[in-house]
């Protein structure tokens, strides 16, 4: 894609966020943020415990175009992935998907959605370990 295509993609996700809003039946809820710039995201992640696949992601948040568009993109692109895939995913994948030259100056904003999702996976797995019998 060309530079302008990435810009258009991010603006579209910022102005028309996908999967925005809380859900009541989420398997795990995780908040993340960048205190230095005021970006905040809360992810509502639903997972299938047997396959360990993400079945739904919703989000709410506040912040810059890149952080909020990134959360919207994550809510679409990570559904269907396994928790192991998410744990192993490089932040570079998200930066490339959003347009490296577009988000290069704000990598923490660009990766906020993925870092919050990784934390949600860790929390979810920790919760499962606590309820599983020995």
Image (tube, grey):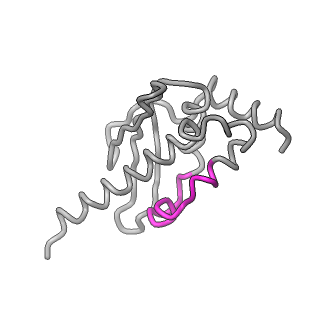
Left or right of 130 on screen, residue 55: right
Q: Quadrant of residue 68?
A: top right
Q: Is residue 86 magenta?
A: yes
Percent x, y of residue 118: 43, 53
Residue 47 in which image quadrant: bottom left
Q: Is residue 53 left or right of residue 100?
A: left
Residue depicted at x 65% and y 47%: 95
Query: In the rendered view of the protein, which quadrant contains the N terminus?
Result: top right
Residue 61, above or below 27 = above
The x and y percentages for residue 81 are 52, 60
Q: Position of residue 26 (x, y in %)?
A: 34, 44
Residue at the location (69% across, 28% down)? Answer: 12
Residue 35 lies within the magenta run: no
* Residue at horizontal 41 percent and vertical 40 percent from the top: 43
Q: Please, is residue 128 above or below residue 8 in the view? A: below
Q: Camera-side residue: 105 or 4?
A: 105
Residue extending farthest left: 134
| Residue at the limit of the structure toward the bottom, as seen here | 134
The C terminus lies in quadrant: bottom left
- Number of numbered discs on residues: 0
Residue range (magenta): 78-94
| Residue 111 place in picture, x, y as percent | 55, 43
The answer to which of 20 and 62 lies nearer the viewer is 62
């Amino acid at each position: 894609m060309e530079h302008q295509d990435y810009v258009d993609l991010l603006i579209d996700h910022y102005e028309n966020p996908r999967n925005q809003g809380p859900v009541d039946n989420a398997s795990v809820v995780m908040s993340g943020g960048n205190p230095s710039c005021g970006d905040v995201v809360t992810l509502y992640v639903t997972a299938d415990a047997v396959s360990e696949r993400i079945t739904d992601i919703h989000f709410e948040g506040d912040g810059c175009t890149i952080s909020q568009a990134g959360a919207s993109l994550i809510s679409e692109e990570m559904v269907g992935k396994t928790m192991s895939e998410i744990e192993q995913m490089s932040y570079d994948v998200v930066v490339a998907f959003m347009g490296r030259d577009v988000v290069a100056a704000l990598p923490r904003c660009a990766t906020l959605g993925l870092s919050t999702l990784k934390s949600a996976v860790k929390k979810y797995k920790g919760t499962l370990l606590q309820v599983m019998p020995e």
